[in-house]
Each structure stands twice: as structure tokens, then as C-alpha cells.
């Protein structure tokens, strides 16, 4: 059973609609007990890094999420859910991310138009599981003012305002996307289906 984590914000309905199109069984929960029982986890995220991490902590969801990760359960972070996988963010320097990856999430420079909003091309690496079958020059839908740096686990990059940043992250059972697959049409559906079929 795929568990969508509800921390009180996030684009849950669109994510649910996409999962329904894949035929996957899923539940939506804010219960730590149900997260502990999940066989796959999706963490959608919108809004503010600090508020999201506080909401997860207030609901007692951080530890069950980390326990599932440690046990090898596939985890997919979407947008702010990807950013939460890093240690910190310039958006809320006092807030603790999950620190599954080192480094900080950065704001696009002042010269950039933010948020980075709309369709943009991503550049997948050969052999990545989450982006398998996307074809050449895939375009997906972004809505982000902050970005994750490219790291060894980066499976696809995107360029905006002269910055090459992580669009897809993949390492072991950890997956993340900076864009919104639930708003990215057939390619977004393919990405979600790839996660479902892992």
C-alpha cells in the first residue's frame, strides 16, 4: 500500500488523482502508525520549508518516515518534499530537514524571476529508474523559488537562471522530484507509474 503523507498542506488531491490513473492502491494519512506500516511513501510538499518541517514534527511524523527510509521502503518526495530530504534550507535556516543528503537548499539569485514557474526541460541520466521511458527532451511543470544543488544522487537536472539544479534525485530507495509530476501531463503520469512499479 502506498501511503501519501498528509501534514496539513500540499497538493494531495492532484497526487491522488494521478495515483488513481495508475491503478495503484493508496491511502492518505497523518497517522504515525499508518506511516510505520507503509510499503511505499509519497511526501508531497508545497509552501514554506520551516512550516512543513514543523507540521511534520507536531504530528509525530518525522520518526516513522525516517524509520521507513532506514528499512528500505521506497520514498518519493515531491517539490518541497524533495527539499525536505536535505539538511537545511535558506528559506528557514533554523529548521532541520531530514538530512538524508548533505547540503542546503538555496534561493534562486535576485536577478532570477521567482518562482520558477511553468514548463521546463529536464536532462535525465542514463539508467535512472524514475525517468525511464520519458523519451528525448522531456518537459515537466515547475513551481519553485528554491532549488536543491546537484549532488551525486542527482538523476536529472534542470537549468534556470544560469543554475543547474537537481530536478530528480535517486539513490537506493530514495527518490525526489523538484517539479510536480501530478501537473506534468503524460510524462508526469509515467514518472509516478515508474515509482508505483518499482
Image: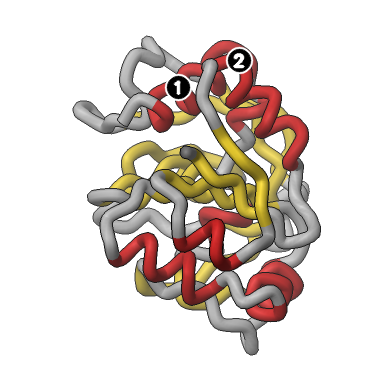
Question: Residue 155's x, y, as percent?
Answer: 32, 40
Q: Please tell me which residue is depicted at 42% across the width and 29% down the height of the picture.
A: 196
The answer to which image quadrant residue 55 occupies is: bottom right
For residue 172, above or below residue 62: above
Helix, strand or loop for disc 2: helix
Question: Residue 116's x, y, as percent?
Answer: 70, 43
Cα separation between marks 1 and 2 = 9 Å
Point out which mark residue 193 bears.
1
Point out which mark residue 66 bears.
none
Q: Is residue 45 left or right of residue 70?
A: right
Q: Crowdedness of circle 2 by 10 Å Cα count: few (<14), some, many (20+)?
A: few
Helix, strand or loop for disc 1: helix
Q: Mark 2 or mark 1, which is nearer the start of the sequence?
A: 2
Point out which mark residue 21 bears.
2
The answer to which image quadrant residue 125 occupies is: top left
Q: Residue furthest left?
A: 127
Amino acid at each position: 500500500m502506498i501511503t501519501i503523507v498528509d501534514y496539513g498542506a500540499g497538493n494531495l488531491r492532484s497526487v491522488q488523482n494521478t495515483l488513481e490513473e495508475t491503478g495503484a492502491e493508496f491511502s492518505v494519512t497523518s497517522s504515525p502508525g499508518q506511516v510505520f506500516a507503509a510499503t511505499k511513501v509519497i511526501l508531497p510538499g508545497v509552501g514554506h520549508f520551516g512550516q512543513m518541517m514543523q507540521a511534520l514534527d507536531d504530528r509525530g511524523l518525522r520518526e516513522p518516515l525516517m524509520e521507513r527510509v532506514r528499512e528500505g521502503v521506497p520514498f518519493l518526495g515531491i517539490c518541497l518534499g524533495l527539499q525536505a530530504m536535505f539538511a537545511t534550507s535558506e528559506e528557514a535556516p533554523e529548521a532541520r530537514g531530514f538530512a538524508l543528503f548533505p547540503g542546503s537548499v538555496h534561493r534562486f539569485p535576485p536577478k532570477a524571476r521567482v518562482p520558477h514557474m511553468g514548463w521546463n526541460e529536464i536532462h535525465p541520466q542514463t539508467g535512472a529508474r524514475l525517468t525511464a521511458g520519458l523519451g528525448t527532451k522531456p518537459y515537466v511543470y515547475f513551481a519553485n523559488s528554491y532549488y536543491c544543488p546537484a549532488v551525486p544522487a542527482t538523476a536529472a537536472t534542470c537549468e534556470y537562471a544560469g543554475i543547474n539544479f537537481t530536478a530528480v534525485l535517486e539513490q537506493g530507495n530514495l527518490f525526489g522530484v523538484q517539479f510536480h509530476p501530478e501537473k506534468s501531463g503524460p510524462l508526469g503520469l509515467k514518472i509516478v507509474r515508474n515509482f508505483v512499479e518499482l
